[in-house]
Amino acid sequence: MTPDASIYVAPRDVAGEFKASLHGTGDWRIGFTSQGVVQRTLRPTADRIVGRFAPTPENQPGVSHAFSVWIPWLSVVRPAHGRRETAPVIWLSSPREGCVTEVAMTLIAPTVVVSRAVDHRGEPVAVLGTIPRPTGDTLWVVAATRECPPSEAEEYRRLQSKHADELRAQATAESDFRSLFIGVYPDGSYYFLDLAIPTTS
């Protein structure tokens, strides 16, 4: 959170290169950082923005879904990753096989009284934290785990296998890759899909 009420979201492994920026002005975007442009050898004049989106319509009066991160069960390959963090960290349990954990950010207007925390589908969630914004509303960060429909689980496996084959074809010696996919909800809001790509059998 910045003094102008902007919110920045980035997966740990690429936080210096790629992020979602939910600016307090309402200019919401996903794209590369200036450092990411250099590291990805993009042209200095290249547009760093991958996509723009507006604050989503209210799911209910005074409540707007802002952004989410999805972590499928097959993405948790190193449970101890990051355990040396010195800053405060909230640890979540690994999703069960066939499930995905969604961490969602929701903006709540000051006129709204929250009697129970639910996600944009109305399902109960765990509250990870709340951050008041200078604009008067509050950012709620919540998490919930849901079962994947068979078609969704199969798509995760397909993406994982496809990218693993591509990395093996490059004869890379690394064995701990992650791919970041960008998805869009029906309401127009975006989410990051964090997917581990194992390259060793």
Image (cartoon, grey):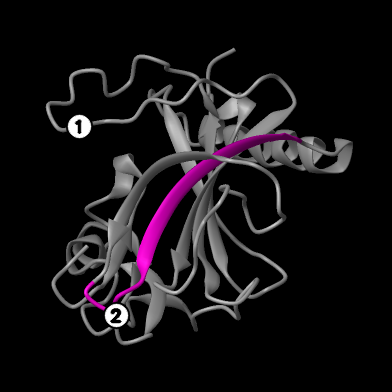
Reading the image, the residue beneath label 2 is: 24
Q: Nearer the viewer, residue 135 or 55?
A: 135
Which numbered disc, 2 or 1, marks the residue that appears first in the sequence?
2
Question: Which residue is painted at 59% across and 32% down in the image?
Answer: 164
Q: How many marks?
A: 2
Relative side of 19 to 188, left or right: left
Give, as a three-letter code, the residue at label 2.
Gly
Q: Nearer the viewer, residue 27 or 197?
A: 27
Q: Quadrant of residue 89?
A: top left
Per the rendered image, the range of residues in magenta is 134-147
Q: Residues within 10 Å of mark 2 (few under 14, many from 20)?
A: some
Relative side of 27 to 121, left or right: left
Question: Which residue is painted at 60% across and 40% down in the image?
Answer: 163
Relative side of 68 to 133, left or right: right
Is residue 58 shown above or below 160? Answer: below
What percent of the width, then of the height, locates residue 179?
49, 43
Q: Quadrant of residue 30?
A: bottom left
The secondary structure type at the circle numbered 2 is: loop
Is residue 33 shown above or below 81? Answer: below
Q: CA distance from mark 2 to mark 1?
A: 25 Å
What percent of the width, then of the height, locates residue 171?
46, 29
The image's mark for residue 88 is: 1
Is residue 151 shown above or below 130? Answer: above
Pick the quarter of the image with the N terminus.
bottom left
What percent of the width, then of the height, locates residue 182?
55, 59
Question: Which residue is painted at 61% across and 24% down in the image?
Answer: 95
